[in-house]
Structure formats: structure tokens, C-alpha cells
């Protein structure tokens, strides 16, 4: 049963202590019964306030070990408030905003927390899109001199897949690809869409072999040039994505971390019709106890020591 706060007052009542937060995470991580991450045994006994010892292999595990919260020195009550604030912001949140609202000691702490949580916005083993799907690409980055359209330099190419649920857009998937070749586009489609689905694209050759991969391919627009005349659902998603990047992150997005911003946008977009923002809080916490922890060094791998490339909208 999904149990989550629907209002700020309910949130404050549910998570006022560390014990309340740990108990909630325990239920999310082991909804049926304890399961040892090492041997899979389903019985354990508590050895401290937050540590359990497996009755099978004697392995000791805490409710936060192996999760997004692994190794944290901050109280869970603060983490929960960060997640509530993040998910209650309809248009997203910035590291500076999180630092100010929680009174964190440094911008770096807020930045790390947000990137940890963005990594938890992708549900492990999530279902692929199905039915009728529009697929197209869009470039992230402002106007620059040189070639336009497919093959433009200094920008990131993002494949957009959107379920056609007329008159509205269904679920979406966003994926950054290295180029608009058939290899890159076909791999992106296979990751995002179930076989047997109807794929609607333009006439770009990169999509010409989709039928051999088990899809029903329909070319709805012969013109393959990227511009204003995009497929309608994909065009709308691309416009909303760029507006979101501009409004929340002032249009400056680090190339090395763009994938995680795409994950956040997808997470928010696919849950935009939720009646209560607490549902997003619940889903993010569900994922947070299921994804592997990411240390800070891994986050900045390839970034530290060199100037990050950014795109300005």
C-alpha cells in the first residue's frame, strides 16, 4: 500500500524524527520482509538503532547502506526535507536554492545531493514505451555559427520518444546520443520502446531499418531536416525541455551531467498529472533505496581538472 504525505503538515508529522525516517525507508526497502543483500536470507535481528545482522551469514547492514544515502553524515530528516522540497518544486530545483532552503554549509554539498537524487529518478528495470510512439531528435544548445541541423557541432543531440495519447502526450524517454547515425538512433529506440510498437519518424535514413528490429515504422514527415517543423509531440517536449533548462538552470548545462538533467525532466514530466506532489516524493524514495550509491569522485570523474563544457540556451 502506498503511504505518503499529501501536504506539508502531513510530511512534518510523519518525518519529525530519525526513527520515523529509518522506519519508512525500511518499509520501502524491504516491503515484505528483510532480505540480506549478501546472501538473500530473510531473517535478521537489530544490533543497534540502525543496524541489522543477517541470521544466515551474520552480515551487518543498515537501512541506508547500498542506497543513495550510503555513507551520509547528515541526518535523514534533512535528506527527507531535501527530497520533499525537490519534488514539490514543479519546475525543478537548483543547488543554490537547496543550499539556501536547508541552510547547508556549502554549495558543493547541495550539488552532490541533487546529483545523487537525480540518479535515483530512473526506476531500475522501468517499462519501455508502447503503442504509437513519435521519435525525433533535438539539439541542446544555443545558436552558434556553422552547420545547422543534424551534424551541428558544439551541441548535444537528444533523442525524444513520446507516446501518442491524443490529445495529450503520454510517457516520454530522453536519451543523449553521440550522433544521428542508424547505430545510435536504433540503440536509443530499442532502449526506450517495446518491440511491436508503431514508430513515427521523419524521413531520416537513420530510422530506415526499424522494421527489421521488430517495429512498425511509419514516416509521417518526409523532410528530415531538424528545425521548427518537428513532429508535434516531440516538438512540444523539446520546447518544454529547453524552457525548463532555461528557467531552472539559467540555460547553462554541463555536458558531463546532461544525462541526469534529462532524467530529472523525464521523471517530472511523466508524473505531471499526479494529484499530490507527495506521490513524487514517495516514488523518488522508492528508487533511492534501490539504486547503487555513487561516490563524489565518480560524479566528477572526467570533470575535475578541466573546464566543463556548457551549453547556453
Image: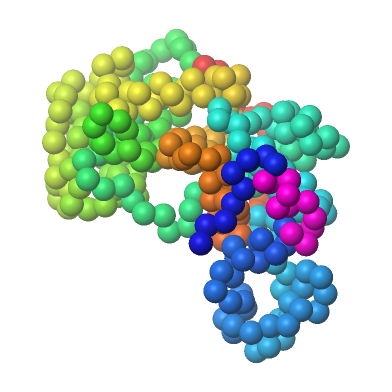
- Residue at (63%, 40%) from the top-left corner? 7
Residue 300 in sight here: no
Residue 82 vs residue 109, the one in the foreground:
82
Q: Quadrant of residue 95?
A: top right
Q: Is residue 256 left or right of residue 189?
A: right
- Residue at (80%, 55%) from the top-left corner? 17
Q: Is residue 215 above or below residue 165?
A: below
- Residue at (72%, 57%) from the top-left corner? 21
Extreme residue toward the top, this view: 145
Q: Quadrant of residue 82?
A: top right
Residue 127 in sight here: yes
- Residue at (74%, 77%) from the top-left corner? 52
Q: Is residue 171 above or below residue 77?
A: above
Question: Residue 310 placed where, x, y %?
Answer: 58, 25
Q: Is residue 4 left or right of residue 154?
A: right
Q: Is residue 88 above or below residue 67?
A: above
Q: Which residues are magenta?
A: 10-20
Residue 61 vs residue 304, the one in the foreground:
61
Question: Residue 272 placed where, x, y %?
Answer: 45, 35
Residue 89 vs residue 151, the one in the foreground:
89
- The question of residue 17 being in magenta is answered with yes
Extreme residue toward the right, this view: 105
Amino acid at each position: 500500500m502506498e503511504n505518503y504525505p499529501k501536504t506539508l503538515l502531513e510530511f512534518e508529522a510523519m518525518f519529525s524524527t530519525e526513527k520515523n525516517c529509518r522506519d519508512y525507508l525500511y518499509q520501502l526497502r524491504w516491503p515484505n520482509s528483510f532480505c540480506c543483500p549478501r546472501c538473500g536470507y530473510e531473517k535478521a535481528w537489530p544490533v543497534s538503532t540502525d543496524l541489522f545482522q543477517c541470521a544466515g551469514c551474520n552480515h551487518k547492514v543498515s537501512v541506508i547502506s547500498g542506497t543513495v544515502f550510503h555513507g551520509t553524515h547528515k541526518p535523514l530528516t534533512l535528506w527527507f526535507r531535501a527530497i520533499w522540497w525537490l519534488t514539490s518544486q514543479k519546475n525543478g530545483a537548483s543547488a543554490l536554492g537547496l543550499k539556501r532552503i536547508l541552510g547547508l554549509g556549502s554549495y558543493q554539498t547541495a550539488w552532490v545531493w541533487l546529483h545523487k537524487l537525480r540518479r535515483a529518478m530512473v526506476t531500475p528495470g522501468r517499462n519501455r514505451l508502447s503503442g504509437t510512439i513519435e521519435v525525433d531528435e533535438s539539439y541542446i544548445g544555443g545558436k552558434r555559427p556553422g552547420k545547422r541541423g543534424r551534424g551541428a557541432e558544439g551541441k548535444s543531440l537528444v533523442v525524444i520518444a513520446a507516446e501518442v495519447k491524443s490529445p495529450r502526450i503520454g510517457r516520454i524517454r530522453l536519451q543523449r546520443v553521440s550522433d544521428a547515425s542508424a547505430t545510435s538512433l536504433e540503440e536509443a529506440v530499442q532502449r526506450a520502446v517495446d518491440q511491436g510498437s508503431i514508430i513515427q519518424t521523419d524521413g531520416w535514413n537513420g530510422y530506415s531499418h526499424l522494421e527489421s528490429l521488430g517495429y512498425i515504422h511509419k514516416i509521417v514527415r518526409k523532410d528530415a531536416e531538424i528545425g521548427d517543423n518537428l513532429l508535434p509531440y516531440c516538438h512540444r517536449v523539446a520546447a518544454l525541455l529547453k524552457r525548463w533548462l532555461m528557467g531552472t538552470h539559467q540555460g547553462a548545462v554541463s555536458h558531463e551531467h546532461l544525462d541526469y538533467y534529462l532524467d530529472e525532466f523525464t521523471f517530472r514530466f511523466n508524473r505531471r498529472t499526479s494529484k499530490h506532489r507527495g506521490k513524487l516524493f514517495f516514488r523518488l524514495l522508492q528508487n533511492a533505496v534501490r539504486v547503487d550509491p555513487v561516490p563524489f569522485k565518480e560524479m566528477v570523474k572526467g570533470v575535475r581538472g578541466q573546464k566543463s563544457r556548457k551549453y547556453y540556451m
